Image: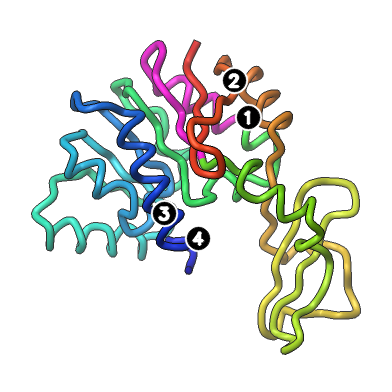
């Protein structure tokens, strides 16, 4: 697994199949936010949907472009920050933001801003499709598997915020067993709860998230 594929192959396949079923057979206009190397974008394009992929990582966009070229797939790709790129001039039917991309919005205000941009970009009734972050990852917390600590090799360190559902994973020479508070330099991510997502959706004129496939996909709709 890597930043472009933060889940195993079986889970990824279930998620992609769930999204394809959710979208239906009629061609739709779709934006894939955080498209990576095309894990979801390519199957959507193959299914006949008109997909635009955006990613802040130019290497991801280049990798996606190469894969699309190899498969003779026509998709629009843009590198840049979603806050700079959205909304487009025309509205779309769905916005996909999967691969744990939404967790990168650790700041709640930024997350609400992103959802507002999604809402502005959607046609009425259009969908925001996210990972089922609460259903997939919160059970790990409940079972005590995600806690402050360092692995046996001393190469990975898990650090939680003291007062929020935000954490960072330090790797290699970033591991600091003397420091168990989040640093400015840490790459922070948010483990979204169902309630927090529902509140963020309400502030963005989106419907409360509904789970389509537990642990795989949840959906908000433009009101």
Mark 4–mark 1 distance (CA, rounded to whole Å): 23 Å
- Residue 84 percent across, percent down from the top left: 45, 39
Per the rendering, the mark at residue 5 is none
Badge 2 marks a residue whose secondary structure is loop
- Residue 220 percent across, percent down from the top left: 52, 24
Badge 3 marks a residue whose secondary structure is helix
Camera-nearest label, 3 or 4: 3
Question: Looking at the image, which is closer to me, 54 or 163?
Answer: 163
Query: Circle 4: is it few (<14), some (14-19), or many (20+) Cα within 10 Å?
Result: some
Question: Looking at the image, which is closer to me, 45 or 203?
Answer: 45
Q: If you read the primary sequence from the N terminus, does the residue marked by circle 3 or circle 2 appear first?
A: 3
Per the rendering, the mark at residue 12 is 3
Q: Is residue 27 left or right of residue 178?
A: left
Badge 4 marks a residue whose secondary structure is loop
Mark 4 highlights which residue? 6
Query: Circle 2: is it few (<14), some (14-19), or many (20+) Cα within 10 Å?
Result: many
Q: If you read the primary sequence from the N terminus, does the residue marked by circle 4 or circle 2 appear first?
A: 4
Colour mode of the rendering: rainbow
Q: Do the residues under discs 1 and 2 have CB atoms within 8 angstroms?
A: yes
The residue depicted at 67 percent of the width and 53 percent of the height is: 189
Query: Circle 3: is it few (<14), some (14-19), or many (20+) Cα within 10 Å?
Result: some
Per the rendering, the mark at residue 204 is 2
Mark 3–mark 1 distance (CA, rounded to whole Å): 26 Å
Give the magenta range.
112-130
Camera-nearest label, 3 or 2: 3
Q: If you read the primary sequence from the N terminus, does the residue marked by circle 3 or circle 1 appear first?
A: 3
Mark 4–mark 2 distance (CA, rounded to whole Å): 27 Å
Camera-nearest label, 4 or 1: 4
Q: Do the residues under discs 4 and 2 have CB atoms within 8 angstroms?
A: no
Camera-nearest label, 4 or 2: 4
Q: Is residue 143 left or right of residue 222?
A: right
Per the rendering, the mark at residue 112 is 1
């Amino acid at each position: 697994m890597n930043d472009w594929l933060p889940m195993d192959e079986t889970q990824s396949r279930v998620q992609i199949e769930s999204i394809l079923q959710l979208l239906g057979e009629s061609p739709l206009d779709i934006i894939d936010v955080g498209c990576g190397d095309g894990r979801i974008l390519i199957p959507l394009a193959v299914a006949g949907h008109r997909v635009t992929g955006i990613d802040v990582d130019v290497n991801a966009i280049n990798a996606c472009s190469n894969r699309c070229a190899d498969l003779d797939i026509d998709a629009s790709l843009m590198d840049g920050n979603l806050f700079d790129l959205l909304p487009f001039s025309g509205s779309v039917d769905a916005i996909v933001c999967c691969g744990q991309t939404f967790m990168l919005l650790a700041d709640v205000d930024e997350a609400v801003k992103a959802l507002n941009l999604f809402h502005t970009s959607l046609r009425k009734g259009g969908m925001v499709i996210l990972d089922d972050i609460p259903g997939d990852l919160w059970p790990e917390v409940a079972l005590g598997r995600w806690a402050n600590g360092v692995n046996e090799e001393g190469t990975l360190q898990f650090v939680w915020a003291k007062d929020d559902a935000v954490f960072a994973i330090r790797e290699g020479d970033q591991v600091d067993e003397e420091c168990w508070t989040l640093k400015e330099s840490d790459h922070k991510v948010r483990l979204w709860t169902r309630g927090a997502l529902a509140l963020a959706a309400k502030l963005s004129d989106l419907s409360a998230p509904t789970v389509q496939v537990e642990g795989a996909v949840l959906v908000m709709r433009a009101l």
